[in-house]
Amino acid sequence: MGEMIVQGEDLGRWVTACRLDWDSLLPVQQWVLENVLSLTPAEEAERPVKRTQEGKWTLSLAAARQYHAREGHLNVPRKTSSTWSRKAGRPLVRNLSW
């Protein structure tokens, strides 16, 4: 998704939010998005996958292992803000916290 900021608003995020929450929009809002901006509701394949508790635990454990391998300990400072990735460019866990 590209990035276009207008008056402090990321239009790419706004469009995505509108498409994902289509059913919560008023009919007039849906009409404007469809007829003026040519937007449609998000397809099922475009919707984010909900993670299970087990999946979240697996991701956190993998992030902790990466941190330990890199730092040699698990004393993670509270304000740590790093991206831990499974593959380059694919975020795994944004912040390592428990």
Image (tube, rainbow, N blue to C red):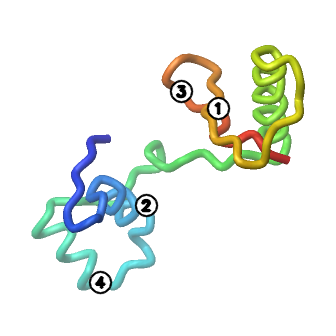
Q: Is residue 15 left or right of residue 52?
A: left
Q: Is residue 31 left or right of residue 87?
A: left
Q: Between 67 and 40, which is closer to the camera in this rendering?
A: 67
The percent position of residue 72, horizontal first and vertical second, equals: 86, 17
Secondary structure category for the residue under label 3: strand
| Circles 4 and 2 in contact, beta carbons < 8 Å | no
Secondary structure category for the residue under label 1: strand
The percent position of residue 12, horizontal first and vertical second, equals: 29, 53
Above or below residue 62? Residue 38 is below
Q: Which residue is mark 2?
A: 20
Q: Which residue is mark 1?
A: 92
Q: Quadrant of residue 18?
A: bottom left
Q: Which residue is mark 3?
A: 90
Dot 4, how many residues are within 10 Å of its Cα: few (below 14), some (14-19), or many (20+)? few
Q: Which residue is mark 4?
A: 27
- Residue occupying the point 81% across, 14% down: 69
Separation of residues labelled 4 and 2 (CA atoms): 15 Å
| Circles 1 and 3 in contact, beta carbons < 8 Å | yes
Above or below residue 12? Residue 60 is above
Q: Amino acid at mark 2?
A: Leu
Separation of residues labelled 4 and 3 (CA atoms): 36 Å
Q: Amino acid at mark 4?
A: Pro
Q: Amino acid at mark 3?
A: Arg
Q: Quadrant of residue 30?
A: bottom left
Above or below residue 55? Residue 79 is below
Q: Earlier in the sequence, mark 4 or mark 3?
A: 4
Separation of residues labelled 1 and 4 (CA atoms): 37 Å
| Circles 2 and 3 in contact, beta carbons < 8 Å | no
